[in-house]
Image (cartoon, grey):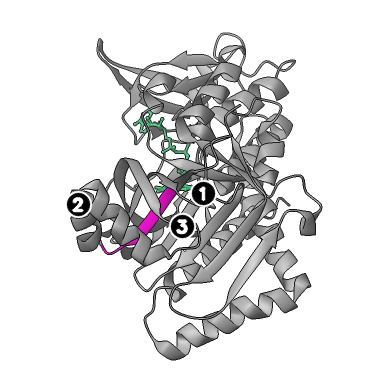
Amino acid sequence: MSDATTEPHFDYDIAIVGAGPVGLALAGWLARRSATSRLSIALIDARTPEAAATDPRSLALSHGSRVMLQPLGFPADATPIRRIHVSQRGHFGRTLIEHDEHELPELGYVVRYGSLVAALADAVRKTHVDWVTDTSALPPLQDDESVTVPLQSASGERTIRVRVLVNAEGGLYQQAPRETAVANDRRARDYGQTAIVGTVSVSEPQANVAWERFTNEGPIALLPCGGQRHADYSLVWCGSPDEAARRMQLDDDAFLAELGAAFGARMGRFTRIVGRAAFPLGLTALHALVERRAVAIGNAAQTLHPVAGQGLNLGLRDAQALCDALSTDGPRPLALAHFAQRRALDRRLTIGATDTLARIFTVDFPPLAAMRGLALTALEFLPPVKTALARQMMFGQRR
Ligand SMILES: Cc1cc2nc3c(=O)[nH]c(=O)nc-3n(C[C@H](O)[C@H](O)[C@H](O)COP(=O)(O)OP(=O)(O)OC[C@H]3O[C@@H](n4cnc5c(N)ncnc54)[C@H](O)[C@@H]3O)c2cc1C
């Protein structure tokens, strides 16, 4: 039993480590939901939202993610996707996914990472969330009542004591996936691939069409990203680490020529590339999201291959489910148990589908390529299957 004199001191009810899109969305949603109960919330990140503007990624967000984010804010420069064209290079078979088949205004949107972080940060700054510009030095210390989180800043070290700690500090793309493969608390796979990202322009653009083209080396995604400037596409070109390293060194003309040879001429010629950057690709997925009073969400919980653009969409569904659980059950282990239970199916399906796609479309074995072509073609003739697949990718499993 605790009374006023023995009640332990807490700095915050909830500390969220990581102000990436997932941590920001959770902070914003929690602040809105807890306006009356007034949960005290800290959001911890040494990086400012302005620094995130330099992140070279553009992200495809599903219509379902936009609906979730709308109450907080959505980037004004987002580009709608109305058709997705999926095919494989050098083999027959393709499928089209159209927005009107699903009675949706758009299938999804392409947003710049920096624009999304800026929009969410604006929303969070208007709330009672305490933004702490420190770095957390996980792992934290836990007892039955609380979590003690060590923090480091330019002015030194300190600790804060909280009831629940949320790890939203992002993924492991920047580290070699092999380093994590030995850990037994997670599922891990090294795809032996690196993604080159950048913004390209084409000579014959098709407005609001996103392309996913599978090659023997890995998928190439082109996402419309120029707003009204239809000629611009965000490129994600997955290939072997050696080839990616070589392509990073090519001059622009040589790079664009190789990209044209790999993607084909469906949008004419590639005329420009800016902002080339490379990301090593791997799968890391924690087996358990909760450890007593600490919980992981977003890329800290699972880091996926970008093949179907599911990483952030899945992370936002983590954040929304955690917001629901903490708002309903309070900052207690019971809320975290409910959260973990509710996320199990969606995680299993989305991680499984992404992992399968990343692997089966890169095996250079002619009979398998023929089967993949058949599968893509069959989707055109099996609308219920295509619809079910598209809906899983757009909305996931929320219950
Ligand atoms: C090439 C590429 C293309 C992608 N395309 C898509 C796509 O089309 N669609 C999609 O849904 N997903 C896509 N993804 C995945 C997407 O980028 C991630 O899922 C998303 O960024 C995860 O958000 P997050 O907030 O969990 O983590 P992050 O975006 O990594 O943010 C983590 C935050 O935590 C902070 N942080 C880290 N460590 C600490 C610490 N110790 N203390 C305090 N703060 C800390 C960081 O500064 C950062 O602000 C892609 C990924 C890649 C690499």
- Looking at the rendered structure, which numbered label has been put on residue 250? 2
Q: Nearer the viewer, mark 2 or mark 3?
A: 3
Quick one: SS at disc 2? Answer: loop
Residue wearing tag 1: 223
Decide if residue 68 is on the left or right side of residue 117.
Answer: right
Please report whichever mark, 2 or 3, sits nearer to the chain's N-terminal start: 2
Residue wearing tag 3: 268
Q: Tell me where the magenta segment starts and ends, as one range.
A: 235-240
Q: Please indicate, yes or no, whether residue 185 appears anywhere in the rendered image.
A: no
Q: In the rendered view, would you say 379 is above or below 267?
A: below
* Quadrant of the displayed image that contains ligand 1: top left
Q: Looking at the figure, which quarter contains the N terminus?
A: top right
Residue type beneath disc 2: Leu
Q: Pick the residue in front: 216 or 186.
A: 216
Q: Nearer the viewer, mark 3 or mark 1?
A: 3
Q: Residue at x 51, y 23 (%)?
A: 118
Please report whichever mark, 1 or 2, sits nearer to the chain's N-terminal start: 1
Q: Check if residue 5 falls in the magenta segment.
A: no
Residue type beneath disc 3: Gly
Q: In the rendered view, would you say 364 is above or below 390?
A: below
